[in-house]
Image (cartoon, rainbow, N blue to C red):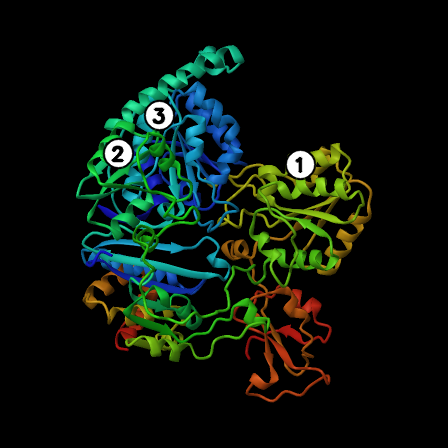
Amino acid sequence: MKELMSGNEAIARGAYEHGITFASAYPGTPSTEIMEAFSKYDGVYAEWSPNEKVALEVGIGAALGGARALVIMKHVGVNVAADPLFTVSYTGIEGGLVIISADDPSMHSSQNEQDNRNYARSAKIPMLEPSDSSEAKEFIKIAFRMSEEFDTPVFLRTTTRVSHSKSIVQMEDVEIHEENRGIPHNPSKYVMVPAKARQRRIEVEKRMKKLSAFAETFPENRMEINDTKVGIITAGMPYNYAKDAFPEYSYLKLGMVHPLPRGLIREFASKVEKLYVAEELDPFIEEQVSAMGIDVVGKEVFPYTGEFDPGIVKRAMTGNEATGGNLPNLSLPQRPPNLCPGCPHRGLFYVLGKLKVFVTGDIGCYTLAFMKPLEGMGSTICMGAGVGMAHGMDKALGEKGRVVGVIGDSTFIHSGITPLLNMVYNRSNAVVVICDNRTTAMTGMQENPATGLTLQGEATRALDFVKLAEALGLDNVRVVDPFDMKNTRSVIKEELSKEGPSLVISRAPCVLLAVKQKLPGRTPLRVDPDKCTGCKACLGLGCPPISWKRFEDMDIKIEKKTKKQEGIAFIDSSLCNGCTLCQQLCSAGAIEEVVEDE
Amino acid sequence: MSESVRSVLLAGVGGQGTIMASDILSAVMISAGFDTKKSEVHGMAQRGGCVSSHVRFGSKVYSPLAAKGDVDILVSFEKLETLRYLEYLKTDGKVIINNEEIYPPSVNLGETAYPDDAIDFVKKHFKDVKVMDATAMALRSGDKRMANTVILGVLSSWLDIEAGIWEYVLKKRFPPKILEGNINAFRLGRGV
């Protein structure tokens, strides 16, 4: 049976077909759907771990116990997991261990576009890179076979375009592979004290040598010899772009990007007149080919930044500008993503924006609050940084009441607890707000340790943020409803004036979660045009249903309430969730509930 | 670019059903025997941003993304979004425009103006342009949420695939309760 599958779905399917029954992950675009698909297969154990480091350690533990373990994360997640990563490379494993790194060229949903092929090289771990869904399904199986044959963790790298684009995949049956689960008594392999690590270090180099030899005959490193005037070395999605642009040329298509097949590269280079490397992001392959003394064209024509497409590859290799019509340049209004109507973050960040504090932000939907008109955030670096940076800035300014750190609930659990403890320990005066919307909203509403449910839907103990904060030693802990802006504002102001660190938990469920859980909806609102004074206060929320119309652009005649009034506000009631924030800001009392039978 | 591969670019705003429409189009192309690839930008789309989806089909498709200047048909679910993706069209490319306006935040705030001459602009530069009000047409089929099925019907009239294959895919896709409405919406669009 054939099916149209995303790369992510295909990886999950491939793991299932290979008999994998153990997986751990932390959600992150573009990797999330791998785990969501895998967790639904029969007979598997799948968990959301609190962060990528824990997910990898869980995977290592499972593999040590003889299970074949799959660990999934986005590219920046590998930074979090880097500590165990570099040492599990030394120990090797008992069962197979495969780590998925889903990279994000063009930063569709990320704070940077690091090239994680560099991790494979520096941690001395082999890396496979599929170019479409069919390969993704096949390569995950190869990765597990290699892991066991060479006693090593194996990376499978995708990019957003491989993870999220869909192509045709042939379904296969589930293979039965016996696992030898049990306790390995082998301290010289698994206790990495210096004396033992030094021995394993030598084994790592022996393994890399064996893997280099393996790469030479690995069937997924393949030459396609056509017109030999031009040869292109490429891997992953750029292979497709190049084949689309130049079907006539010759290719060395690499299924494994680390270690490289040096002999094969030399052979290919000798067959073609001009050699290119087509790769997104870093000149990872190019520099190694160059170091072999081979003449190669790469980043001198291809961009360092962003993902490619067939047009970019064609333009790089021919020097010609893109074809297409002679369209004049249009300057169009942008359509940036926005907080949803009824989002609980909106009220909180409206308040923070008005308080004129510096907000050290974090990674989540609420990061969107940095934009106009809310402008409620001053920095975003990585998960957890909202808390750590608030403390550092508070110390640097040396004056209380000026810095608020914000962090989401799942993000707080991911890496906000340790920096909060640091604030207590090192006597901070900053305020931290947990934007607790009861889910991991940004990546599509995954469960987390505070939701009371596991990935596979089992009830579990839910983390209590208030009790945790008390245990960490915080004396000032408050819970607010961000839909009550007046109270939220006064609580944050109070906490800013107190000595010592404060934690404010801004708690209300994500509006999409409320829809998913079929919670009773609130009545949508409308603007009474005869009461609206056109003061624009409601526009300060940046809520999608609220718009502004000038009198001269309207068909109906509306009486001016003040001399200066130029128009009125409108609410598209079909989009409104009735959160009442705009009503709270309207001094004219012009915003009212829609009456059903109108 | 590969001559035998054809590309359709579907564009809209998060929540309009652009991705579902591209899923159906892909399923139709597979049923018609084509190699098919599809790629979209999503992730933050449900929060009101632009959504675009490339669907490419032919005897053998490599890239899931079409190059600028290589798209055969642009299907736009929202008027302003049409303009954003025109550069992807071939010079003789065709355009389908759903005559719906969804204001971006800067227009809502009165900082920028919503372009009022989008359709004239497209017609000036491209020969084959179909404009319709899919939401109103969907209402005639019983539910405005079927607007994307109306749009697929319009698109089908420009693709040489028999109606039976489309309706077979729609039957697999929709539960019985809303199937008839969707088939009607599709036929209404196909007649445009």
Residue A505's x, y, as percent? 68, 47
Please name the residue shown 26% across and 73% down the image. B190
Q: Quadrant of the N terminus of chain A?
A: top left
N-terminal of the pair, mark 2 or mark 3, is: 3
Q: Which residue in the protein does label 1 denote?
A: A419
Letter of the chain that mark 3 sits on in the rendering: A
Per the image, label 2 sits on a secondary structure element best described as loop
Pointers 2 and 3 in contact (C-beta within 8 Å)? no
Label 1: which secondary element: helix
For discs 2 and 3, the disc positioned in front in the rendered view: 2
Tell which subunit mark 1 falls on: A
Q: Left or right: B129 with respect to A63?
A: left
Foreground: A344 or A255? A255
Q: How far across and how far down the image is residue A43, in percent?
A: 37, 34
> Are marks 1 and 2 in one subunit?
yes
User: Compared to B63, does A152 lie above or below?
Assistant: above
Q: Which residue is mark 3?
A: A147
| Gap between marks 1 and 3 measured at Cα | 36 Å
The disc at residue A371 is none
Residue B165: tell me if it is visible. Answer: yes
Q: Which residue is mark 2?
A: A221
In which quadrant of the rendered image does the C terminus of chain A lie? bottom right
- B163 over A467 or under it: above or below: below
Q: Residue at x 25, y 48 (%)?
A: A243
Q: Amino acid at mark 1?
A: Pro
Marks 1 and 3 in Cβ contact (< 8 Å)? no
Looking at the rendered structure, whether the residues under marks 2 and 3 are on a common chain is answered as yes
Closer-to-camera residue (B25/A182): B25
The quarter of the displayed image where residue A353 is located? bottom right
- Percent position (x, y) of residue A453? 52, 41
Sequence order check: which comes first, mark 1 or mark 2?
2
Would residue A555 appear left or right of A152 to someone viewing this image? right
